[in-house]
Image: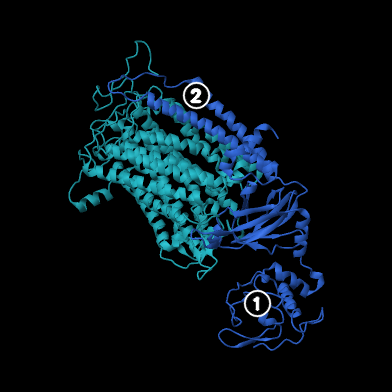
Amino acid sequence: MTTLHGDIPGAHGSHGGHDHHDGGYLDRKGGMVSTIIDWATTIDHKKIGVMYLVAVLTMFFIGGIAAMLIRYELFQPVRIQTVGEMAGKATGTDLATLFGQKDMSVAQADNIYNRVMTLHGAVMVFMFIVPGIPASLGNFLLPLMLGAKDVAFPRLNLASWYVYVFGSIFGILAIVMGGVDTGWTFYTPYSSSHADPGHWRVVFMILAAFILGFSSIFTGLNFIVTVHKLRAPGLGWFDLPLFVWAMYSTSIIQVLATPVIGITLLLLVFERLFHVGIFDPALGGDPVLFQHFFWFYSHPVVYVMILPGMGIISECIAVHSRKQIFGYKAIAFSSLSIAAISFLVWGHHLFTSEGELAATIFSALTFLVAIPTAVKVFNWIGTLYKGSIQINTPMLYTLFFLFTFSIGGLTGLPLGALATDLHLHDSYFVVAHFHYVMMGGTVIAFLAGIHHWWPKMFGRMYNERWSMFACVLVFIGFNLTFFTQFFLGTRGMPRRYASYPDEFQTLHQISSIGAAILLIGFLVHLAVLVGSLFAGKKAPANPWGGLTFEWEADSPPTTHNFHHEPIAKHGPYAFDDVVPPHCDPKDYPLADPLPPGTKAH
Amino acid sequence: MNPMSTTLADGFWHWLWFGSPAKSSSAVARIGDELFMYIFWLSVAWFVFLMGLTFYFVVKYQRRPGKKLTRSPAHHTALEIAWTVVPTLFLVYIFFKGFWGYADAIVAPANAEVINLKAQKWAWRMTYPNGAESPESMRFVYTDSQGNQVTSAQEAPIFVVPAGKPVQLRMSSMDVIHSFWVPDFRSKFDIFPNRYTSYWFQADEPGDHVVYCAEYCGDLHSEMYAIIRVLPEPEYRAKINSWAIPWGDGLAAVGKVLYTTKGCSACHSVDGSRNTGPTWKGIWGKEHEMEGGGKAVVDPNYIRESILVPGAKIVKGYPNQMVSYQGQLNDRELDALIAYIESLGDNPPAPGAGYGESAESN
């Protein structure tokens, strides 16, 4: 262990702006108005984390409604009646009917579906899953795990939240103005010259993604500096919790990749507004150039989405198995190598549009990124070996993650292999695959994390039975919804279709029923968590027996996080030898002491 | 064919994933299916092993109150190297299999029949080597839950191709990016507005295969179907020859071919029988009553207007149903159709004669 700069000015305790209040950070200081002002101007990373949590979950809710509308429309296909008085009338345009639009042409009805499909993708990607874990749990936990009082740049942190909200308002404005039908990928020349010509809403949606990028950069920059400069005394790089390693790797990608999408989206706006020919061949541009630029950002960002989830899983599996992570360094370095390789695989999104040489190289590199990911899964399962495993909601979600994320990873293989991808590209197989990774991976890990740290964040315990019940509902709903879509894809169902031939209907209906179960599961979770705030038992400081710094703080932590500056005296997962802080040794028996002269692993 | 491949690309599990066997040449689609099934079984083995192990650990190492922790190694170098190297070997194998199959699927044989394919929002058009285009189209017909007959929303053009012969499509787009996907052939490729891309297949058995647009392209993306109809080669030749435009045989002869290939025959008869639209037989030079009052004489300008702006004048008793052919027909083709309608009149002009004195336009 190395001792590092515990006394750098500003690192611990000299953020002059704080009022020195030593109660819980959630304590109200006055009436409604002053509380709102207090939150709106806070530079406390915990409050900003909670504000982000509320914001991204709101966006998850909006994106989720769009997903339900998609599944509603796809319950039956669009058809034209041929006999009787209604001949020529479109049926099965359920979404349009839901919006009160009767007797629309198929083109008009499909157009509504295309807008909802774009809304789902854009909201979920740009406003929920990219900022999701880092900005909410990351903001809350990173300084706590480092033993710091705040992030390195607290004001920048608050600014990032406002930038996020500002960007999201642009996105919502685009939706309110009638929505956008470009798909979240904004492929040119459709997005630049064909979609809603002359309408500002497309520009607004593009600008929303552009602005949201800055909030990512702010957060990423903040985290990198925080990890480098604000570690508590004694906390060396290899004593960092793996969640911190994941955040660190994520931040590097965010800072390096986000400017590329920023420039690309600005070019797109220039082409749309001023007809500067960059991507549209009619103006002298090249549409494939856009795809390269777009995926040069958007593929690394896939790892911005999943790495934080992997970090959560590492924490949960260690704490709830009371076992040191198997192959700590392998997991830490796999995060970094995933971050590095992630910049070299964007071309696998273009297997059906780029040249043969490029496709071959990108296919090989894609398989390369599978290796560190597989290593992580093996290490997690290895951690369970000879553990002391407690099944509760966060652990159930962790096992759920291992199940769905493994499927997500394995179904990436036929997409990375060129011969099979030619068939599966842009089919429902891809849709199922990335939902298994993004939802079965990131969202499930997010839920594990929320339940793992909820007592710490809000000082309340939730009802364990009900939340485990909700977890089972989510598991059933999720797999029904998305496993069917693998078969739809291999059997020939293209993605982004509002209708389909009859042979696909049964699988689509099973998928839609699964989505309804999924929705119910989420609503039960919401009720249980919100209920815990009002009726939950008061949470102890360390309900699970964790050893990382955040469990030394109170639940909820005080404004300044710790009563005394914490000092790292043991590794983050030394369960065998250390009684967890605030815990009764009787509840957490240790291993037999090592014989003198031997070293712990 | 080796024994492994015959088991992997057939049978229940193959049916479960693909529904039907690959309908393209064995060299291309079969490699993809075999690789897919290989990956599938490999994945099943890994997944069952990993989940089995997880389940076993979770049950065996459940927390029991008061029980001391058991020490175990924090890492194991040999094990970690093994579980890095072994998957890598499998991945290398999958990569090469994928590459070989891809090479076969991408590079068309030199003796392929080259057909041009144009994609636009939201239709497909094929131009055959002799310049002909397919006039045939169809809708999928279904029975809905109430027992009514319903159809898909758009006409899907029917493209004929020869059986047992490699076919290469030279593809380009008129507007945005599209993608040509035939699930039965297990391959797709994107179509761009500023370059040609290639797609090839060889279907050995006669039969129909559905084409989907696989790259999102706007409103009717979901309805952008086409049918590939595989015919024995002689039938294929006969078909495309019958659709070829005989420019050397005079305008009326060209018009006669366009009458079928451009879809006029769907609504207008040439034998006097009533259809969705008025028959062309004997209408030249006659005066007709129009919907909403007024009369019009069938002359070149009337016909031109009726083709390009069909709703402008509707013959009494007929529905306003025709779509505009603006942009679908060039001036030469309009001339040809007008000459053909004139030739169906009561006093057809001698071949090669001009329009004669056109009647006064109303």
Residue at 70%, 41% in the rendered image: B27
Please report the residue visible at 22 percent of the width from the left and 39 percent of the height from the top.
Answer: A24
Q: Which is more foreground, mark 2 or mark 1?
A: 1
Label 2: which secondary element: helix
According to the image, label 1 marks what residue? B274
Residue under numbered circle 2: B80
Of all residues shown, which one is farthest toward the top? A596
Residue B14 percent location from the top left of the image = 59, 40
Separation of marks 2 and 1 at Cα, in angstroms: 80 Å
What numbered label is drawn on residue A315?
A: none
Q: In front: A21, or B43?
A: B43
Given residues A360 and B326, the one toward you in this image is B326
Q: Secondary structure at mark 1?
A: loop
Chain in blue colour: B
Badge 2 density bin: few <14, some 14–19, many ≥20, Cα 10 Å = some
Disc on the earlier residue, 2 or 1: 2
Query: Which amino acid lies under the numbered mark 1 shown in the image of this protein?
Result: Arg
Q: Chain of mark 2?
A: B
Badge 2 amino acid: Glu
